[in-house]
Each structure stands twice: as C-alpha cells, then as structure tokens.
Image (cartoon, rainbow, N blue to C red):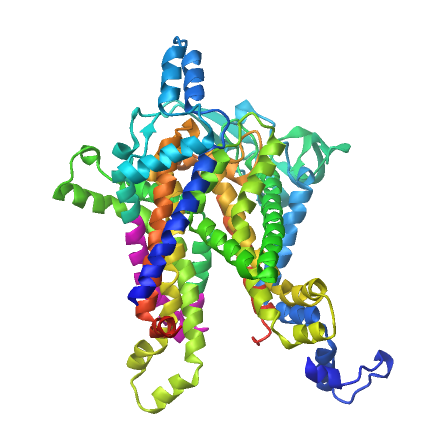
Amino acid sequence: MNAGMSIPPEPESDGRLSADDAMSQEKRYLASQWRLMWWKFVDHRLALCSMYLLCLFYFVALFCEFFAPHNPRQRARDLSFAPPQRVHLVHEGRLRGPFVYPRIQHFDQELALLTYTEDRSRVQPIRFFVRGDTYRFWGLVETSVHLVGLRDGGRLYLMGADRLGRDLFSRILYGSRISLSLGLVGVFLSLVLGIVIGGISGYFGGITDTVIQRFIEILMSIPSIPLWMALAAAVPPTWSQLTVYFCMTTILALIGWTGVAREVRGKILALREEDYAMAARAAGVKEFRILMRHLVPGFTSHLIVVVTLAIPAMILAETALSFLQLGLRAPTISWGVLLQDAMNLQAVNLYPWLIWPTAFVVFVVLLFNFLGDGLRDAADPYRH
Amino acid sequence: MIEYIIRRVLIMFPTLFVISIIVFTVIQLPPGDFLTTYAINLEQSGEPVAMEVLDALRERYGLDKPMVVQYSKWIGGILLRGDFGQSFGHWRPVKDLIWERLGLTASIALITIVITWMIAVPIGIYSATHQYKFSDYAFTFAGYIGLSIPAFMLALLVMNAAHMKFGLDVGGLFSDEFIDAPWSLARVVDLLQHIWVPVLVLAVGGTAGLIRVMRANLLDQLELPYVETARASGLSETKLLLKYPVRVAINPIVSTIGWMLPQLFSGSVIVAMVLSLQTTGPLLLRALMDQDMHLAGAMIMILSALTVIGTLISDILLAWVDPRIRFERQTS
C-alpha cells in the first residue's frame, strides 16, 4: 500500500503506457483492498463456481413456487411411494424431446406393496411454463405457471413420492427456502451478538474483557447438541410454525456467536496497537471513531470468512435437530423434516429415493466450504 | 509445571459452578414441570389422578419452591452425597441409570479420538509432503465430503450397507443376550464387535478437519529455513521430517483435543439415536421430552464436566509436549 501512495494517480484518459504489465502493475497499486481480494478470489475457480451455484440455490429457494412442479402439500393417495420417473429423449427410435412414460400401478400380493412400472406405449412430453397447481406467489399474486410439468395436471415426479404421494422434488425445493434462509438468519444474529460482545470485550479490556472471555470459554465447553436439544425441547409444541422458526434460529445463534466474538476481540486487540491506530489517536480522533472507522474495516474481510464457514454448520445443526424431531416439525417443510422419513431403515431399503434431501444438504454444505476456503485465501494479504 | 497444573485445576471449580447454573436454568425453561406432564398423561389415559400423591411428590422434590431453592437442593445433593436426584420418568435414582451409559459414551469418544489421530496424522503428513499431487487432491476432496455429510445420515447409510451387503445387524452396542448381562470378558468382546460402527461414523468428521489442520501446519513448517539446513547437513528425509517439522506441526493438534471432546459428545448423541446405542443420547432425548429434569440435568452436567476435564488434560499434555509453553510459564 505504501508503495502505491508514491505513484500519483493518473486520469484514465492519459493512462497510455507502453507495456501492458506496467498498466496492470499500476492498476494493482491503485486498487482498493476489496478489488484486490476480488481479483485473487476470481483466480480460485472452485470457489467462484461454488459462489455462482450457491446464488442459484438461493434464487431457486426464493422463487420455489415457480420452480417446483407441484404443490408440496398436495397428496395423491394413488401415488404413494411412486418411484422417480426417468426422463427420456428417444421414443421408438425417434427424438421426441424430454418426456416421461406414464406409470402403471400394480399391487404386489406377496410383499403387500404398491409397485410401479412404465407404460412404454405412450409418451407424456415435459412442458416448460406449464399450468399446474395454483399458488399465491409470495402470498400476493395468484398464478399457476410452473417451470416444468406435464400437461393436463399430470404429475411429474422427478425424485419420487413420499408415503402420502407428495412430490419429493417440490418438497425439497420448498424445504430449501427454510433450510437455506435459516442458516443466513442464524449467522446474521450470531454475527450481531458476536460483534457487539466481542467489540465490548476488546474495546474496554481489563475486567470486562476477562469476565466475557471466561464466560465464552465456559459456554464453549458445554457440548452444543445436548444444550441445543435442551433449548429446543423448551419450545412449546403449540407455537406457530413461524415462531418455532425464529426460536430455532435464535437457539442456533445463541451458541454460534462465541466464535465470532473471540475473533472480533482478538483482531481489535491486535489492530489497536498498529501504527495507524496510534497515528489516529495522536491526531486526536475519538476512541469510538477509531474503532468504527479504522479498526472494523481492518477485519471485515476476516469476518466474512468466519461467517461463510459458520453457515454450513448452522444448516447441519438444523437438519440434525429437526431429524430428532426437536426442531422444526411438519407441516413445516425443511430438509431436516424431510429426512425424518429416511430414519426408518426399511423405508430406505424399499424406497431409496427418500434420501435425496441428504444429497442436497451435503452439496450445499460442500459449496459453502469451498466458498469459505476461497474467501480465506483471497482475504489473506500474505498469500499469493 | 506443577504450579501450572494446580492453577488450571483451581480455575475448573468456578467454571463448573457457572456451567451448573446454566444447565439448571436451561432444564427449567419449559413451562410446567414433570408432574404436570405426568398428570396430563394420566388424565388422557383415563386413570384417576390422585392430587394428594402429586402434591406429596411436588413437596418432596421441592418443585413448588423458587428456583434458587431448587437449584441449591440439586447442587447440594450432588456435591455432598453424590446424589443426582430422582428420575421422574423411571422412578429410580438418577445415579442408577446413567453411569454405565456415561461410561460407554466416554469410551466411544476416547476410542474415536485415538482412531482419528491414527488416521489423520499420517494422512496429513503424506498430503503435505506430496502437495498438489493426485493423492493430495484425493485426500482433500474426501476430507471435504467427510466434513459435509451429516453424521446421522452417515450412520444410517453405514447401517443400511452393512445390513444389505453382509446381513449384519450393527445397531446397538451389544448383542441381545449381553444387553443386561453383568460385565464379563465375553461382553467386552461383544462390545468391541459393535463399537466400530459408531466410532467409524464419528471419526469421519473429525478426521477430515484434522487432516486439513495437520497438512496446513506442516506445510508452513516445511518452508522454513531450518528444514533446508537440516537437509543440507545430510539428515535422511524421514528422520528430518519426523524429528523436527512434524513435532512442531502436531502441537496445535494436541490443543484441539479440548474442543474435540464437546464435538464428539454432541455428535455421539445424534449418532446414538440412529444406531440405538445404549449411551446417553437416547436417554437424554427421552428425558428432555418428558421434562425429566434431574435426569437430563445430570447428564448434561456430567458431559460438560468431562469436557472441562478433557480440556485440562489437553492443556497439560500441550505443556508437556511443547517445551516453549512450559518455559514461558516458568519465567512469567
């Protein structure tokens, strides 16, 4: 940065330099901290891809009514445990675009089970922007257009059905809205708590600091899942879905903030001794202003990394608690709630598609880990 | 060294005191107490509820008293008589119910730590010395997967695979004939035949994390000039690696035992539910749902205490392994 100061910034129109790398050299000197981070981050292909994919996930979750082929609560008794339908392209040697074959239901006397086979003589083409179950989009506009589906109310089950014949794929998409947002909200709450408490601890120091640090250490030494379980068990079953949702995020955040608080405190303690903080102090800047204006920007990038790596932990915690039936409960749809169906070994053997939600959990958590690692490398000024 | 240990032991007591307050408060959070739940259940099943009996029970356990009184009764019983109170759900003293389960939980955690180390440290060393080779990428990728899969799902999948492929029933910690049997050599053997499933499942997540830490630490060390010097002086590569950089790189891992324990206890609770193990997990969940507060409180309290002791041991171990920490304490 110091070297950058000595080169006078030139207006862009006169910036004709003989060599290209002299140009990029200069750009590098003049770039802000965030721009430098972005350049380094873009080099990290895996992290960049993960970021785009995560954006896609959140986008789909935001508009899940449109992306899901069906209403996730629409039961179909005659489609109980219907297997995923295979999407075909070629019918009797001719290319027909994506289509599925209609199902035929049999009753297996021996196993006392419904089984399904494909009717290979007819073709049900998959349509885009098709009319299906009506829904109120964000509770505002009533419409019935879905991204994909079959015509005339045919039921397209890409990932099979659950016991009540509900479309698992639609349920997973609706579940992503709850599970993904819960991670974000939970992390936001723990970030606020962590910054405030960690800030107080690092800023005031002395007795306050010691007490807060001891308290955090104590909180950290209580195994989190038993504590979560105890807190979650205290949520009365009579509360509404929305209230339970906010209780869950608060419970997750209550335990997650300790890590953030320690990071914030450590960084403040280290940065307040830096020369530039000293210079600001010598120039008569107020302590609080030094903190907010000069110290906080110094570790924002670091915090973003911590937060990115905390989100997957929250998502995993939600699935675990809901799986134990301590978290969100049906009729709320979340990935953890969907996994309750997979708890039964027999069910998993007979209907292996019930573990599809796991694939989504693992994939999203993996993406967050890749993204977090890429950000960490980008935010570290000593790494090239 | 001894002074350091004494000081660390003394800090433990206020820590445990604060933990006990937190645990008790959390256990008290649900509205009502066990007896109200119990009365409602009785009423629903159509049995007459004897109010006098309930009142007598309430008075006996001090459930009608303010929280401070209840807390002091609870903690006093634990400290003075080792009495963790009465389990309302089982109508038996808590201490009869929990010790064997706690022992099994702790042994699963300890075995898991040992296994995790045995896998993670060599792989971490290998990954660091073969940086950016195919095997390094393969281990890193496998590690990421291990970090991302929920432990309970892994347990479910392992159990399913064992059942389908080998026809093994790997649920539980004992075969049927040994569940209530007294301890014997045969029972221990039976336990060892079952314990590998939860240990394997729990070890996966921890191993993935440890490999990353070990790899990063060792890579940092390998860049340093002293390694080059040792190499120049003709030390064989293996000896050089194990004698210096690995020793330094392993220190942060020793200090992680402290936070591995709470994670393992946490993880084992859920895995135990899936695998129906005779550990604290299922009992704790039941107790929490029934508001069986003495039982739940005792279990969370003891798990936390074990964690605090584990941290203490890891701190002492760290001081013993790393002479710099030892000397720093002496001079300060």
Q: How many marks?
A: 0
Image quarter (top left, top right, bottom left or bottom right) of the C terminus of chain A: bottom right
Is residue A237 placed above or below B158 in the rendered structure? above
- Is B131 in the magenta? yes
The spot of residue A205 in percent (x, y) is 57, 61
Locate residue B253: give its quadrant.
Answer: bottom left
- Is A129 in the magenta? no
Is residue A51 placed above or below A352 in the rendered structure? below
Return the residue found at the far right: A13
The spot of residue B79 in percent (x, y) is 31, 40
Locate residue A45: give its quadrant.
Answer: bottom right
Numbered range of the magenta stretch: B108-137
Q: What main secondary structure does the magenta stretch of the protein show? A: helix
The spot of residue A297 in percent (x, y) is 67, 65
Locate residue A94: give its quadrant.
Answer: top right
| Residue B322 or residue A142, whichever sits in front | B322
Residue B278 in view, yes or no:
no
Q: Residue at x 54, y 41 (%)?
A: A251
| Residue B284 or residue A207, whichever sits in front | A207
Residue A177 in view, yes or no:
yes
Is residue A134 rendered to the left or right of residue A230?
right
